[in-house]
Each structure stands twice: as structure tokens, then as C-alpha cells.
Amino acid sequence: MDEKKTLYSAIQPTNNLTIGNYAGAISNWLKLQDDYNCYFAIADMHAITVRQTPAELRQKTLATLALYIACGVDPQKCCLYIQSHVPAHAELCWVLNTFTYVGEMERMTQFKDKSARHAENVNMGLMDYPVLMAADILLYRAQYVPVGEDQRQHLEIARDIAQRFNNIYSPTFTVPEGLFLKVGAKINDLQDPAKKMSKSAENPNGSIFLNDGKDAVIRKFKRAVTDSGAEVKYDPVNKPGVSNLLSIYSIFAKKSIEEAEAEFAGMGYGEFKLAVGETVADSLAPIQAEQAKLLADVQYLNTVLKNGAETAARTAAKTLYKVHKKIGFYQI
Ligand code: TRP
């Protein structure tokens, strides 16, 4: 019998993923895949809320899958699939829309940010983004959702929608809990450590992409902003730059912050930055090689996706059926 709890997460296939995505999502999934019944989706339906180039979206979707697997996400243990391959996401989203208020969506921080950044295309999908995300999670009756800090508000709304529905009808949805991992949940920009590392930062030197070569990685770390003083110490308030580098190191060297601090005690900033850069570059190299190998075997990747979509669709259909029944949709 499968006693494992269910865990759900998804990642958008757009742009290059940064080490922030790795730390905030992928690396955490690796630790969770043995203990939970895991679903990991590639959220292509979320991606199109911002205009995409079709050929690029297609290529990045496959590259993202290959990257997950290259990082160690095991398709034998987890259900890996593409969101648009399971129509139940769109179907449940529609129903949940009728349990969500326009005002709530207008108040979402990410919606406000993205509306400002994409003022020429404030489409309904952009506004509906959190409801689709709620549908993703609720379809699989997931107990846990590991996400980055930036998704906290979206997770709250998913919980609200689930509870609202359950209260109006009867317990139908599992109310999901976010897993916000402390270290690594947030990696900041190397040039502006007050900001989260982002794939779309103004200054590309502030972000390390998972497909950056060793030279690029070292160069960016060498240029990373540090703080006044000379001590390598974890103090996010007074030393945001150094603390960010320590967090990054702790994640990639798989050491605690305390261990990292001890290791760099007495070392100058220059030497410290180089060491962090080398650790990150050396961690990325094998992942990049494995990703390239997987991308050369599209047939294998397609098989993973086909199996994933079948498994996902089976679970999703059960939830959707229950929902349709409760709201009074006539069933044959
Ligand atoms: N919105 C999430 C992000 O950009 C991706 C996502 C889509 C997601 N659906 C989800 C994450 C469901 C967790 C659960 O990071």
C-alpha cells in the first residue's frame, strides 16, 4: 500500500534557469523524491501568460525536462509531465475561477509586478495565473508544495480556494501546505544582493545560469558585490553580499552556513569569491554534460513524458470528476 504523502511542484520552462531556481526548487525535490509521492510538472500553460516564441518554448520545455533529470530527478520515482498534456488543469481552473474574486487576483504582488513589466500585454491569463496554479496543486490532492518564497502568496490563495470550495460543498480538496526551505529558498542577485536572483535581471552579471560555462561563472563571482569590512560572516542585514555568497556556497558545497564561515575565516573577499565560483562551476559541469546527453535522446524523453502524462491524468481525472459531481454538472 502506498502510504506516502503527495507532493506537487512545477517550474516554468521559460528562459534560462538560474542557480536560484536550482536551490529553490530542483535541489529540494531531490531530497523529497524518496519520501513522497511526487508530481513535478513543466508549467507551459503558465509560461504563455507572457508572450513566447513558439519554437523556443518547445525547445525549452524539453531542455527543462532534461535538466530536471540531469539534476537527479528520477522519472522512476516521480511523475514528470508537461502541464498542457493533462487537460484537467484547464478544466479545473475554469471551475475554480468561479470561486475566486477579481479583487483577490488584482491584489497579487506578482500580478502587479508583471503587469507593470508587460504593460502592453496584461492578459486575462496573467491575472488568472494563481488560479491555474491552485488547479495544478488541488488536482493531485497534494499535501505539500515545495516552492520559493516568491510563490508564498500564490500558495495562500490555493489554500483559500480549496477551503472555500470545501466549506460550500463538503471536503473535496486537500488543503496544501507550502514547504519553504530556509537556506536556498532565496538566492540573491550577485550585483544587487537586495534583490532575488532572477533570469530577467537588468544586469546579466548578477545571475548565474545553470548553462553558464566555467569561465562565465568564475567571472561573475569575481565581480560579485561584497560589503564593507573584510570579514566573511553571515549577516544578511549588514552584509547582504557576503551572506548571499555564503548561502550559495553552502548549497553547492553541501555544507552548513557555520561550516562555510569557518572555512573562510580570515580569508580575503577576493579569494572567497573565487572559491565560491569554483565550487558552483564544478557542480554545474556534470549536470550540463548529462543534460546534453539526454537531449540527444529525444525518444527517451518522450517516453518519460508520455508515462508521466498518463499517470498524472489518471489522478487528475478522479479529482475533476468529484468536483464536477459536487457542483452539479450532469454526468452520464
Ligand atoms: N508559478 C510557479 C513558479 O513560477 C510554477 C508553478 C506552476 C507551480 N504551478 C505550480 C509551483 C504548482 C508549485 C505548484 O515558480
Image (cartoon, rainbow, N blue to C red):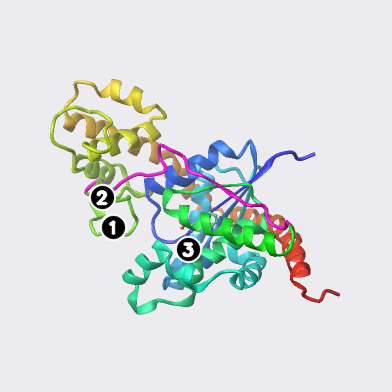
Principal SS element in the magenta part? Answer: loop
Give the percent coordinates (x, y) of residue 187: 35, 44
For the residue labelled by badge 2, is the local secondary structure a helix, a strand or a loop? helix
Q: Residue furthest front?
A: 167
Residue 146: x and y, percent? 53, 46
Query: Would residue 302 appear left or right of 201 to someone viewing this image?
Result: right
Name which residue lies at 50% across and 67% down. Answer: 129
Residue at image mark 1: 201
Circles 2, 1 touching at the beta carbon (< 8 Å): yes
Determine which quarter of the picture holds residue 249. Answer: top left
Q: Residue type at mark 2: give it.
A: Gly
Tell me which amino acid carries mark 3: Gln
Q: Position of residue 218 (x, y in %)?
A: 25, 40
Relative placement, left or right, of 53 versus 133 is left
Task: Spot the residue most to the right.
Answer: 332
* Residue 206: mark: 2
Residue in front for this viewpoint, 118 or 182: 182
- In this rendering, does residue 256 appear at all? yes
Q: Magenta residues?
A: 171-191
Residue hosting label 3: 59
Q: Quadrant of the C terminus?
A: bottom right
Q: Is residue 20 magenta?
A: no
